[in-house]
Image (cartoon, rainbow, N blue to C red):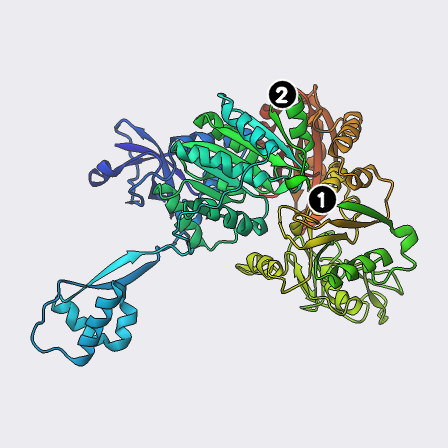
Amino acid sequence: MIVGVLVELSNKNVDKVFDYRVPKEFEKKIKIGIRVKVSFGHMELIGFILDIKKEDNRELKEILEILDKEVILNEELLALGRIMQKETLCTLISAYQAMLPKGYKASRKTNVNKKIYTYVKLNNYKEQGKLSASALKIIEYVKKSGPVLRSVVNKISKSSVDTLIKKEILTCYDQEVYRLENTQEKGSKQYELTRDQKKVVDEVLNDQEPSTYLLHGVTGSGKTEVYMELIDHYLKLKKEAIVLVPEISLTPQMVSRFKKRFGSNIAVLHSALSDGEKYDEYRKIVRGEVQIVIGARSAIFAPFCHLGIIVIDEEHTASYKQENNPKYNAIDIAIKRSQYHHCKVLLASATPSLEDYARAQKKVYKLLHLPKRINNRELPKIEIVDMNKAIRKSKNGFSLELIQAIQDTINRGEQVLLLLNRRGYSSFISCSSCGYVEKCPNCDISLTYHKTSNTLRCHYCGYGTKVNEVCPHCKEKALKQMGMGTEKIEEIIPKLFEQARVIRMDFDTTSKKGAHEKIINAFKNKKYNILLGTQMIAKGLDFEDVTLVGVINADTSLNIPDFRSSEVTFQLLDQVAGRSGRKDKNGKVIIQTFNKDHYAIKYAKDHDYIGFFNTEMMVRRQLSYPPYYYITYVKIMSKEYSLASKESMKIGNYLKKKLTSSIILGPSVCNVFRINNTYRFGIIIKYKNEDQLYKALETLIEHYKSNSKIKIDIDFNPNSL
């Protein structure tokens, strides 16, 4: 028997199946989709069996070891990987690796063990001669408690436990346990749906086609209840469901709500879990122990065999698109999987992406509406503070209006959410004498000051250095902190508000395991009355006592040099505003900005998604941007500036010659020109129908695949340029 094996190396030069002979003793264990160990050159590698071939007389290396009893990549996932390879131009192995947790990847470095506890239990005990006092104590303990951990009774007397096992009075056995705690009770909590919610549910369930829906529901309209009602229906039909959330911070709240309804019938998959926890959760799915998976982007690959529905919450969020290879979009994968399973896909957001809302208008997706908050509660009133006028009277970046509103909210015993989409203490450090700015030595970007660690850090490559008091350029003691980040605001708040108890939620405070959940629970339990954070606090969180949301600088995302900056700003403001006044109390929002007349700010003030959509669509049409045109971004990177520049010009000319139906812009330097000492040039391809696109790009990849000095990176429909 001969098998085709795809090895673990993600390199275009070995992006193919290699043939190996199967020793006779392995033949009965061979299945497509399992992992095997093989000899590859001078290395021993892990790979997936993708093909079984007829015997022939070629001289071939033999498989060294079979690693799996059960199939890791089923028929659907194998086909999905080939689609990803074709549509994102990634290597096939990278597509398969993206689908799997560490314990299941093809990798020599994979070594995730099952968690095993050793128990003892009492056999049919009859008195057998004289036993020691400790042995009798152990028997009585196990008799009363049932099976117990051996480590527990060992504390009474290890030698007595050994004796009792030897005399077959006790039986010792191993049992696997899952690392994540899970409630075992069956959930039951259920709410009566509103008329709007019921209309949405009925429309989905009465539709016989395996359609994709876009649910446009204002913040606080009860989208999660709709998800659960639909999922409940499919679970009763013995089907399964995947629910994607965009931020790890949203997972605990979503899981908590689902457990109240569905009990322990849930697996959780996201990057904050340990390798062992992911491995356990994945095996729950493989073993058919759960019907629901909740998680971030990669949970879309959960290996269910009978999918009934896929829900993508906050579908507009950029995090559903993977930024490194394979550059897949979870929404695209969801739709591909729905075609295989003939199931429904529900995309949902208060601020849908322009592309998806345009598709819904063209009937590519079916548009559903939740236009009102639960119990007809009003959306929060939004006040815009013009910082051009307010800056003179402001204190440490807080306008008098925001200071007064925060004080009033604290006095009422209610809670405040404060958004500043910039972490760190200050944006950068500059010399007031000569204008020198501390920059990363590896990247073309200024360093951000973090006071807690007293370091300057690069948020691109991770470089860090201690802060100097003396300017290295003019030697004057004139280095000053410029701009503000969340760390600095956290320090300022107690000086402005005596009763303030502030907790910060950003990348720095949530890097430790379980940090998201601890911060959310602490705030929910009112240990703190101000939650300060970056964009991770803007979406999906539900706190009944938050009646004020403050946006300290709405222009942070507006000033990004990218065609999506207005859309990102509107979405961020509308979403964070939606955290206010979600229960019985009226909410208020104060947005500080230097651009009060910008249409993204104006429409956010009025919660007017349709107005923003229509205006932004006109801008996109005039500038030939999505959804009127597709975009592909080609990055050319090299450690040598001159080589990157020369090759990018050659590639630009080649693409202009080959893609005559497209608009080709560039090459030009990327927004951040140098990262990790690598120079980056970009070429933008805009197109509606371009038959030659994939062929031209595949030719480029093939041409440069053996060139160690030049790297080509291709991103279809990128989030940013």
In the picture, the quarter occupied by the C terminus is top right
Answer with the quarter of the image where residue 315 lies. top right
Please give the name of the residue rendered at 18% of the width and 80% of the height, measured from the top-left corner: 133
Residue 363: give its label.
Answer: 2
Instruction: Decide: few, some or many residues near mark 1? Use Cα within 10 Å; few <14, some 14-19, many ≥20.
Output: many
Q: Position of residue 595 (x, y in %)?
A: 86, 44
Quadrant in which residue 328 is drawn = top right
**Separation of residues labelled 2 and 1 (CA atoms):** 27 Å
The quarter in which the N terminus is drawn is top left
Front-most of residues 613 and 108 = 613
Residue toward you, 198 or 417: 198
Percent x, y of residue 451 = 71, 67
Q: Is residue 630 above or below residue 296?
A: above
Within-10-Å neighbours for mark 2: few <14, some 14–19, many 20+: few
Q: In the rendered view, tell whether residue 161 sits above or below residue 533.
A: below
What amino acid does circle 2 point to?
Answer: Lys
Secondary structure under tag 2 reads: loop
Q: Please provide percent x and percent y for residue 557.
A: 75, 46
Is 543 placed left or right of 500 in the picture? left
Dot 1: element: helix
Picture disc at residue 257 = none
Percent from the top left, x then y, of residue 131? 12, 77
Q: Is residue 46 visible?
A: yes
Q: Circle 1 is placed at which residue position?
A: 572
Q: Amino acid at mark 1?
A: Leu
* In the displayed structure image, the side of residue 226 where residue 180 appears, left or right: left
Who is closer to the viewer here, 401 or 480? 401
The image shows residue 167, relative to residue 279, as above or below, that is below
Tell which of 368 and 110 is nearer to you.
Answer: 368
The residue sitting at the left extreme is 129
